[in-house]
Image: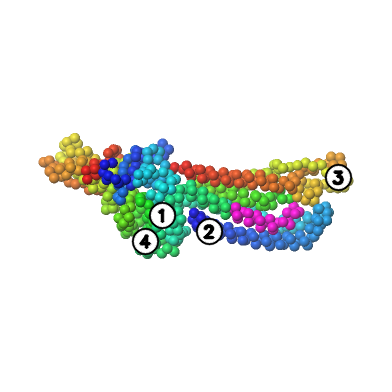
């Protein structure tokens, strides 16, 4: 790729596909994620998010295509692959009968690069006693212990699958703040699968949208927002007359509200000087994501943000 | 991996140690009591004098006292120990990880899952083997007076002494391990593993009972009243050797034709039965490793 010359992508999928029996859980997935980014992975239930994460960490083997982590192909059952990626599964599984100290010793025993100092310091900061049993901790504390396990592994890529789904709003904020801090501190690349789009907007600088096993959007969040506009046009304006590709169109009595995808230059021009009788405004992050999620048939073969990144 | 395996199996290990201590104390008391009865009945001196002939009455009353009373609870416990312990240790090893979702944690550390499983299996199997051998040794000591005057090619001795208990323990372990991988449920895997082990035990009981692969025939001369009184239940047996298991006796002129399992068949039979148990157990454990290794969904 031409952008970020010399920087190997943290994560790169190439025509990645996984079939379960006759049904494809994920198909024809091609994208790249730059190192150091926080990537939101969005999609409805069954869209293939967990499949993508499991393929990345090598819990599943792809039916076709491949995933590469920092330029090296990800392989199932490979210690080198496992060393490059930390995985925090949904519902943050831990051994319930273990104490927190036991969990960390487990981590130390199974990971040569284990950072015991980081683990102890985080528990100190969070005021979670090492001698407490996991099952006696609150949901938020368990999630924090699981996150600490993932961070202390010291892998350069962190995968989080619905990490805050079971947490209350305060615990969610704390958790996400810690993820951002860890990423900023050590240049960690983070991939977060989540349903909470508003949360991802605050958190992420890169976005992947999966729908029915296909990749719909992939790119930098800024490019993505800059590449979409909301137009209010007379109802008789045909889709062909609009600048860019129509993603979603809502018709009312006299006007239509249309979300279009277009090169950032065209979007900026339309907003600066809309044709007479039209209104144009920038699209919101959540608005764009929801429009795509509602329309699984809209597939972007070229990632929307790729061109914008190349220009920037 | 050693610490991880120890920590995850600690409750089971402690329970097994407690069970071992309980059985060992019971076996010790029983062994001492058997020895004193054995000496009080002067069975040893009788055996030394005649090789068993003429000791029938004392032996019968000794056997009656031992097998009719104090030894029965121990026999029952020992009969189920391999199945229960093997299933309890084997079922959660994979079953609980899959049931509780912790496999996603265990298999995404830096140790690939096949290596994780093989390391765990090596340690757990070694520990179970040590447990089995130790228990066998304790019981063998306890039962040594009984072994001198009874038939070891039959249960209860046959399924506890020699290789049988240890191999049977590993059989139950392997079956429960595989059941855990297939059922993804600890309790279900325990039950399935236990009953699969019961099937193997059934085969063993067939081999020591109706099948009797090491059966031999012998012609014994006899005369008069001795001939008339000879039966499969004679003590000592009509073959003249205390450990022989006599299946049938038929009179041909002044000879007895005896079909029997010689006491010396104990070890060959142990190897056959132990081999079946160990083969089934290791095949099941091997299947679990293979399935886990190729598992992609």
Query: Which mark, by number, is residue A113?
Result: 1
First in sequence, mark 3 or 2: give its number: 2
Q: Residue furthest left?
A: A276
State the separation of the CA atoms marked 1 and 4: 17 Å
Q: State whether residue A15 is above or below residue B245.
A: above
Q: Are marks 3 and 4 on the same chain?
A: no
Residue position for label 3: B222
Mark 4 secondary-structure assignment: helix
Residue position for label 4: A122
* Other-residue count near label 1 (Cα within 10 Å), few / some / many at <14 / 14–19 / ≥20: some
Q: Quadrant of the C terminus of chain B?
A: top left
Which residue corresponds to the image point at 83% horizontal and 43% vertical from the top-left?
B220
Please tell me whether mark 3 or mark 4 is closer to you in this view: 4
* Other-residue count near label 3 (Cα within 10 Å), few / some / many at <14 / 14–19 / ≥20: some
Which residue corresponds to the image point at 55% horizontal and 53% vertical from the top-left?
B124
Mark 3 secondary-structure assignment: loop
Helix, strand or loop: magenta stretch? helix
First in sequence, mark 1 or 4: give its number: 1
Chain bearing tag 3 is B
**Region of the chain picked out in magenta, as a range:** B128-150
Q: Position of residue B126 (x, y in %)?
A: 57, 52
State the separation of the CA atoms marked 3 and 2: 61 Å
Mark 2 touches mark 4? (CB < 8 Å): no
Residue position for label 2: B11
């Amino acid at each position: 790729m031409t952008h970020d010359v010399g920087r190997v992508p943290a994560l790169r999928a190439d025509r990645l596909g996984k079939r379960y029996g006759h049904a494809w859980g994920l198909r024809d997935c091609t994208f790249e994620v730059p190192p150091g980014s926080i990537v939101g992975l969005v999609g409805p239930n069954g869209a293939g998010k967990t499949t993508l994460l499991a393929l990345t960490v090598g819990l599943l083997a792809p039916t076709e295509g491949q995933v590469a982590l920092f330029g090296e192909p990800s392989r199932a059952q490979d210690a080198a692959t496992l060393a490059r990626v930390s995985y925090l599964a949904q519902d943050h599984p831990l051994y319930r009968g273990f104490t927190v100290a036991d969990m960390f010793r487990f981590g130390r025993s199974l990971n040569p690069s284990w950072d015991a100092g980081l683990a102890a310091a985080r528990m100190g900061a969070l005021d979670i006693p090492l001698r407490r049993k996991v099952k006696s901790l609150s949901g938020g504390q368990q999630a924090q212990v699981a996150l600490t396990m993932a961070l202390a592994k010291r892998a350069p890529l962190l995968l989080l699958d619905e990490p805050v789904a079971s947490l209350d709003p305060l615990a969610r904020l704390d958790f996400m703040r810690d993820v951002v801090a860890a990423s900023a501190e050590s240049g960690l690349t983070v991939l977060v699968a989540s349903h909470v789009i508003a949360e991802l907007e605050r958190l992420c600088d890169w976005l992947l949208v999966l729908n029915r096993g296909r990749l719909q959007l992939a790119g930098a969040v800024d490019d993505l927002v800059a590449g979409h506009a909301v137009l209010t046009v007379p109802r008789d304006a045909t889709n062909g007359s609009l600048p860019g590709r129509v993603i979603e169109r809502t018709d009312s009595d006299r006007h239509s509200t249309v979300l279009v995808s277009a090169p950032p230059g065209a979007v900026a021009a339309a907003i600066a000087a809309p044709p007479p009788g039209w209104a144009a405004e920038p699209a919101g992050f959540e608005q764009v994501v929801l429009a795509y999620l509602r329309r699984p048939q809209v597939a972007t073969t070229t990632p929307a943000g790729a061109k914008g990144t190349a220009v920037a | 991996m050693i610490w991880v395996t120890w920590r995850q199996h600690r409750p089971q290990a402690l329970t097994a140690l407690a069970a071992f201590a309980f059985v060992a104390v019971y076996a010790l008391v029983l062994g001492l009591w058997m020895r004193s009865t054995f000496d009080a009945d002067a069975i040893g001196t009788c055996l030394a004098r005649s090789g068993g002939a003429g000791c029938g009455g004392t032996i019968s009353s000794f056997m009656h006292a031992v097998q009719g009373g104090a030894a029965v609870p121990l026999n029952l416990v020992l009969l189920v120990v391999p199945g229960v312990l093997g299933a309890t240790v084997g079922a959660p090893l994979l079953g609980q990880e899959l049931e509780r979702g912790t496999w996603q944690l265990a298999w995404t550390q830096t140790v690939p899952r096949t290596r994780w499983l093989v390391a765990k299996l090596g340690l757990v199997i070694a520990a179970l083997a040590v447990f089995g051998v130790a228990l066998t040794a304790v019981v063998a000591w306890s039962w040594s007076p009984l072994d001198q005057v009874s038939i070891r090619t039959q249960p209860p001795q046959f399924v506890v002494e020699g290789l049988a208990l240890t191999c049977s323990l590993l059989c139950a372990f392997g079956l429960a391990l595989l059941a855990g991988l297939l059922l993804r449920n600890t309790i279900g895997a325990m039950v399935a593993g236990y009953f699969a082990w019961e099937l193997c035990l059934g085969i063993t009981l067939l081999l020591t009972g109706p099948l009797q692969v090491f059966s031999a025939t012998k012609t014994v001369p006899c005369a008069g009243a001795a001939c008339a009184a000879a039966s499969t239940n004679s003590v000592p047996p009509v073959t003249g050797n205390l450990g022989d298991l006599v299946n049938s006796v038929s009179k041909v002129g002044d000879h007895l034709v005896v079909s029997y399992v010689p006491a010396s068949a104990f070890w060959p039979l142990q190897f056959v039965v132990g081999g079946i148990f160990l083969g089934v157990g290791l095949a099941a454990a091997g299947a679990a490793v293979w399935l886990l290794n190729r598992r992609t969904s």
